[in-house]
Amino acid sequence: MPIITISREVGASGTYIALKLAEALGGTCYDQQIINEIAEKMGKNKDQLEDFDQNSYNRVGVFFQEALASIAQGGMVFHPFGIGPLDWDSAEMFTTYPRNSFQEKDYYDVLTQVIKEIAEHPGSVILGRGASQILKGNSNAFHVRLVADHVERASRLMKEQEIDQQKAEELINGKDAAAANFIYDFFDVEINDAHQYNLVLNTSRISPDKCVELILAAIKQD
């Protein structure tokens, strides 16, 4: 039985489809459990990993984690926009970011370990977090990308989360940027590149339940 990775746009019914797939396969859907497991393995609080997690990825936050780690080792830190070394004459910075910083590679290594451990369990469905890239060479993994029209994404979020249109738009823009930056920075690929997936489905054109049927049919033929 294969492992399914789900890359999805917010508002594309990705969580619903992933849960339905896991139910059909008799497996488990992994989402927040991934970040919880990473935090446990790294000996961190979940909040300390927020800047690194795909759902809330923050390039600036990650940069400062890297900067503090470099300073602790006596290294020089360069400006993230390529305009020379940073001036670290303000002690205030060191009160803003925790001293027990860690580096991007630390997070990447543990993320890779956790995803590969999950992949040892047939029928697992993994939501996001670069699983399609980490398991790219795994012949037992089937990679799905779920998208939807912008208007419908906003409408779904407004209904599901009981928020207004402005908040829905902010959520879409923020989540899209975080996910795209995470995939590019960690794996050097574009999240919307269809060549990265076995199957791409638009849940505005195909109902979520029909998407579940199509994915199940596809993995049987793969």
Image: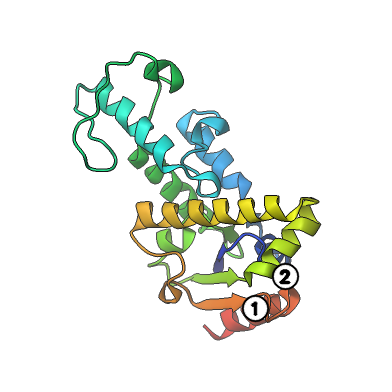
Q: Residue 130, how many percent across, how many down?
A: 46, 57
**Residue 207: quadrant of the picture:** bottom right
Q: Is residue 137 left or right of residue 7?
A: left
Whether residue 21 is visible to the viewer of this picture, yes or no, is no
The residue under the point 28% across, 43% down is: 81
Q: How many marks?
A: 2
Would you name the residue on which mark 1 appears? 216
The residue closer to the viewer here, 175 or 134, is 175
**Above or below, 99 relative to 190:** above
Would you name the residue on which mark 2 appears? 24
Element assignment for label 2:
helix
Whether residue 186 is visible to the viewer of this picture, yes or no, is yes
The residue closer to the viewer here, 82 or 24, is 82
In the rendered structure, which amino acid carries the disc numbered 2? Ala
The residue under the point 63% across, 68% down is: 150
Q: Are marks 2 and 1 in contact (CB under 8 Å)?
A: yes
Element assignment for label 1:
helix
In the rendered structure, which amino acid carries the disc numbered 1? Leu
